[in-house]
Image (cartoon, grey):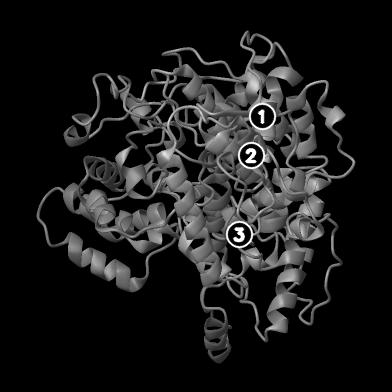
């Protein structure tokens, strides 16, 4: 799995202690031996029936912070009231003041617009936006910029990729043949249009869980349910019963971790070792979705379809998660540990999936809201309040600011508006503070801050971070003035290096004939599960075989080698060089254009001097050295990182 946030086994083992680890290992060994010696159907069916037994919940099971009732805590008082413009700031500042720390001053306008543009739109600001913002001296200039970005069509495109990571979206099935899903793009387009339209998050979730039932006959609502079936699949498997079982189990685990932020996947085989999630809980949750899934050999799954599903399977628990070992029957139900007392089994009588969709933002809203607030905070600061976004359960990370996450979650739950939540975050002083010392910074205080908050988890400064893989490619296209802004439709296939094409089966990457399509936004590049587009893979795009709550961020030699040597990089560097050459014949002015196009700033005197020296070292028409200089800027840290 490429998603580093979910690979926390060693750390968790250290947390629970040596004795617990040894006990867990012993249990796992016994379980493995039991599986190895089993052959055929179990002789004593009474043993299988006992597997459905589950311990009753007690108070400690439900005392974890993410399970508790959600109430907005009072906004704390602070000493530096002038810095704290919003309630968000007061929670952050109170923690800093308690630790004897101070936040950074506000960053400069150039850094702020670049930060905001990358965070809300996923691209650098245009030079026109940059100049307009610098010239706008109205007190609410920044607020106006935020509103303009929130209504931009680029907003939904950027936020959609964040959600598609969670939804493990791809346009192929995966596994050996990696068969194409010709209609998968419709789900991607639905996500984009929904986010741009600003539909409330409760509606956004409900449609993905039960759109076909809530709005029968409306194609877009049915397309939304592709969320449930976006995971890997093997349509040509010999046993379609096994396929049905695997698809449902994968879906159930994904629903649990994405929508509820809890790890359900392991409960398909055994009761959860730490959270109060039993194997029966897993299969009762799975039973909610079973009527909507129908498998046919060699046919890829698309959307849930309960009304036209002719299959009728009896929901049951499967012994040790084995599709060949049916256990006792189960009835649909919500997970007990996050289920409120007022929710009764009969509430699911009309349709369990519709009831579940409503429960997510009703009876379970305390955890649903906390999970999404944590994800949005992570989107803007690199880390969430808890750095295990797909696991806010017992073994997940403890939140750094528990009161703030509750305050934001309670506020978010009032209207479920993602745009309003993001507006609240980006208008805060904590978001607008500098990431490094500025002219007014007390350097002694800065050194103390670095020592006390080395990783920036307390937000004593804005955390510097690298942009996502898609943003790397998109920023290059924007800088070279080469982006083709067409929206929607099937994924496009730009050319691939020959050494990659030979690894694919025949016709698995037929290059899109219209060359202008090759320069579309990365969101619309064909998402193949078994082969990611090179620049996206180099910069840690996940493989979509599992939900990714937080991407890995690596620094590797192949990244630099690709950016310096690939035909894609050279092509865009040359386009940028030709663009700046057409603007002016003056070498110094050309350098200024290059820096503004790539870094959204003017070059320093030293940078101009060194660049002039570099350009004068050749005697050609001027395009080649400009191209090489553009390539150097594409490969600099400043191009990849948000300050």
Q: Report the residue marked by disc 3.
A: 396
- The alpha-carbon separation of the residues under discs 1 and 2 comes to 8 Å
N-terminal label among 3 and 1 = 1
**Label of residue 328 in the image:** 1
| 442 to the left or right of 31 | right
Viewer-proximal residue among 527 and 432: 527
Give the class, few, some or many, for how many residues have Cα within 10 Å of label 3's Cα (few <14, many ≥20): some
Q: Quadrant of residue 94?
A: bottom right
Provide residue 382's location: percent of width, then percent of height.
54, 59
Query: What residue do we see at 41% from left, 48% from top?
Result: 2
- The alpha-carbon separation of the residues under discs 2 and 3 comes to 27 Å
SS of the residue under disc 2 = loop
SS of the residue under disc 3 = loop
- Is residue 383 among what the camera can see? yes
Up the image or down, 630 lies above or below 439; here it is above
Viewer-proximal residue among 231 and 150: 231
Provide residue 452's location: percent of width, then percent of height.
57, 83
């Amino acid at each position: 799995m490429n998603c580093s946030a979910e690979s926390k086994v060693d750390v968790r083992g250290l947390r629970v202690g040596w004795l617990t680890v040894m006990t867990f290992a012993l249990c796992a060994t016994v379980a493995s031996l039991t599986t190895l010696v089993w052959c055929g159907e179990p002789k004593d069916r009474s043993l299988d029936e006992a597997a459905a037994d589950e311990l009753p919940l007690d108070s400690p099971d439900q005392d974890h912070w993410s399970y508790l009732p959600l109430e907005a805590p009072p906004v704390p008082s602070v000493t530096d009231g002038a810095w704290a413009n919003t309630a968000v700031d007061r929670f952050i500042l109170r923690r800093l003041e308690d630790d004897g720390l101070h936040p950074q001053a506000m960053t400069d306008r150039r850094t702020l617009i670049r930060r905001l543009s990358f965070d809300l739109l996923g691209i650098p600001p245009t030079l026109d936006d940059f100049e307009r913002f610098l010239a706008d001296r109205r007190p609410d200039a920044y607020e106006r910029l935020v509103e303009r970005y929130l209504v931009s069509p680029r907003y939904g495109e950027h936020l959609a990729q964040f959600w598609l990571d969670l939804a493990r979206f791809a346009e192929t099935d995966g596994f050996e043949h990696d068969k194409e899903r010709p209609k998968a793009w419709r789900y991607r387009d639905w996500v984009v249009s929904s986010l741009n339209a600003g539909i409330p998050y409760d509606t956004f979730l409900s449609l993905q869980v039960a759109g076909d039932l809530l709005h029968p006959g409306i194609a877009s609502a049915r397309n939304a349910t592709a969320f449930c079936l976006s995971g890997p699949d093997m349509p040509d498997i010999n046993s379609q019963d096994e396929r049905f079982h695997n698809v449902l189990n994968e879906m159930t685990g994904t629903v649990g971790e994405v929508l509820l932020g809890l790890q359900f996947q392991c409960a398909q085989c055994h009761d959860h070792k730490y959270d109060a999630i039993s194997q029966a809980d897993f299969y009762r949750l799975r039973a909610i979705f079973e009527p909507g899934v129908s498998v046919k050999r060699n046919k890829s799954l698309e959307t849930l379809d309960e009304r036209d599903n002719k299959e009728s399977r009896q929901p049951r628990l499967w012994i040790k998660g084995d599709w060949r070992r049916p256990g006792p029957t189960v009835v649909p139900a919500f997970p007990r540990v996050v289920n409120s007392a007022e929710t009764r089994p009969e509430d699911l009588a009309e349709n369990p999936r519709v009831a579940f969709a409503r429960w997510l933002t009703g009876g379970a809203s305390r955890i649903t809201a906390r999970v999404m607030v944590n994800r949005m905070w992570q989107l803007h600061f690199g880390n969430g309040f808890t750095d295990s976004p797909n696991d806010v359960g017992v073994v997940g990370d403890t939140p750094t600011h528990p009161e703030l996450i509750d305050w934001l979650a309670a506020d978010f739950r009032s209207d479920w508006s993602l745009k309003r939540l993001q507006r609240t975050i980006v208008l805060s002083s904590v978001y607008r503070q500098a990431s490094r010392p500025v002219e007014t910074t007390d350097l002694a205080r800065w050194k103390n801050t670095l020592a006390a908050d080395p990783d920036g988890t307390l937000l004593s400064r804005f955390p510097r971070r690298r942009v996502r893989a898609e943003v790397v490619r998109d920023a290059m296209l924007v800088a070279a003035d080469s982006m083709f802004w067409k929206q929607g439709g099937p994924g496009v296939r730009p050319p691939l290096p020959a050494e990659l094409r030979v690894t694919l089966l025949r016709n698995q990457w037929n290059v899109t004939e219209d060359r202008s399509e090759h320069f579309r936004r990365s969101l619309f590049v064909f998402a193949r599960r078994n082969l990611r587009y090179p620049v996206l893979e180099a910069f840690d795009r996940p493989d979509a075989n599992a939900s990714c709550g937080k991407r890995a961020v690596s620094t590797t030699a192949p990244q630099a080698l690709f950016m310096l040597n690939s035909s894609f990089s050279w092509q865009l560097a040359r386009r940028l060089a030709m663009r700046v050459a057409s603007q002016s014949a003056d070498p110094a002015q050309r350098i200024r254009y290059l820096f503004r196009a790539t870094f959204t700033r003017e070059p320093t005197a030293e940078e101009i001097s060194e660049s002039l020296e570099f350009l004068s070292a050749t005697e050609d028409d001027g395009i080649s050295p400009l191209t090489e200089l553009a390539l150097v800027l594409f490969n600099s840290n400043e191009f990849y990182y948000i300050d």
